[in-house]
Image: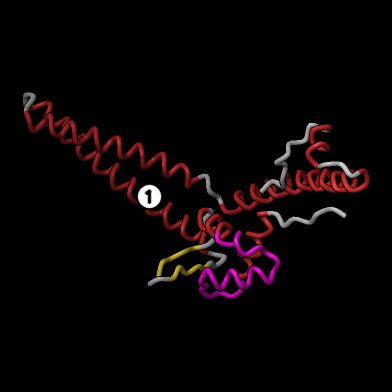
Amino acid sequence: MATVKMRSDLKKTILLEIIRESKTFFKLQELETIGSKKGIVVNTIKEMLQQLVDDGLVFNEKVGINSLYWSFASDGPQKKRIRCKQLMEECERLEESINSKRMYAEKEKSIKKYTKERRELEEKLSMLLTIDEDLKKELDKFRDVDPEAYKRLVSDKQSAVEECNKMIDNIFVVQDYVCNRFSMDKADFNGGFAIPNDLDYIQ
C-alpha cells in the first residue's frame, strides 16, 4: 500500500481554515494542539504558519511573551486596497510638488544666474523625481493585483500543482508496489527509472 503523505498546501489550508472559522486569536501552542488533531505533524505547524504569514494570509503580533496569530477572510484584499490608495495619494502629492518646483526652477532660470540656491533646488528636484519614479513602480505592482484575477491565478496554479502531484502520487504507488513485491531498495528503483531520490509533492 502506498505511503500517505500530507502535502504542504493541504497543511496550510487546514491551518487557515482553523484560524478563520474561529474568528479569534491563537497562540502557537494552541494551533499545534488543534492542528495535530487534524493530522498535521506538530513540528511542521510553526513553519506552515510562517509561510501563511509571509503570504499575507495570516497575521502575527507579539503580545508580551506570546505570539498571537489571526486571520479574517477580508484582511488581505482590504490591506492591499488601502496601501494602493495611500501610494496613489502620495504619488499625486509628489507630482504636485515636482510640478511646483519645476515651474519655480524655470522661472528662476529665466531671471537669475546660476547660484548656490539654484543648484540646491536642482538637486532637490532630481531627488524628488527619483522618489516619484520609485513610487510609480511600486504603485504599478498594486495595480496588477486585481482580487478576481488573483483568485483565477491561484486556482489555475492549484489545478496544475494538483495534476503534477497526482502523477507523483502514482509514482509513489508503483514504487511501493515494486519495492515491496520484489524486495527492492527504493534508491535502486529510482536509479533504474531516473527518478530523483528527493522527489516529493509540489508545494
| Residue 25 magenta-highlighted | yes
Q: Identify the residue under disc 1.
A: 87
Residue 183 shows up from this direction: yes
Percent across and percent down for residue 10 are 69, 58
- Mark 1 nearby-residue class (10 Å; few <14, some 14–19, many ≥20): some
Image point (47%, 56%), residue name? 81
Percent across and percent down for residue 120 are 13, 33
Q: Classify residue 164 as left or right of residue 116.
A: right
Question: What residue type is disc 1 on?
Answer: Leu
Could you say which is closer to the camera, residue 94 or residue 179?
Answer: 179
Q: Classify residue 49 as left or right of residue 97.
A: right
Percent across and percent down for residue 123 are 18, 32
Image point (54%, 64%), residue name? 74
| Residue 171 magenta-highlighted | no
Extreme right residue here?
A: 181
The magenta stretch spans which residues?
Answer: 21-46
Instruction: Tell me the chief SS of the magenta region.
Output: helix
Could you say which is closer to the camera, residue 143 or residue 154?
Answer: 154
Residue 198 in the image: above or below residue 126? below
Image point (80%, 48%), residue name? 169
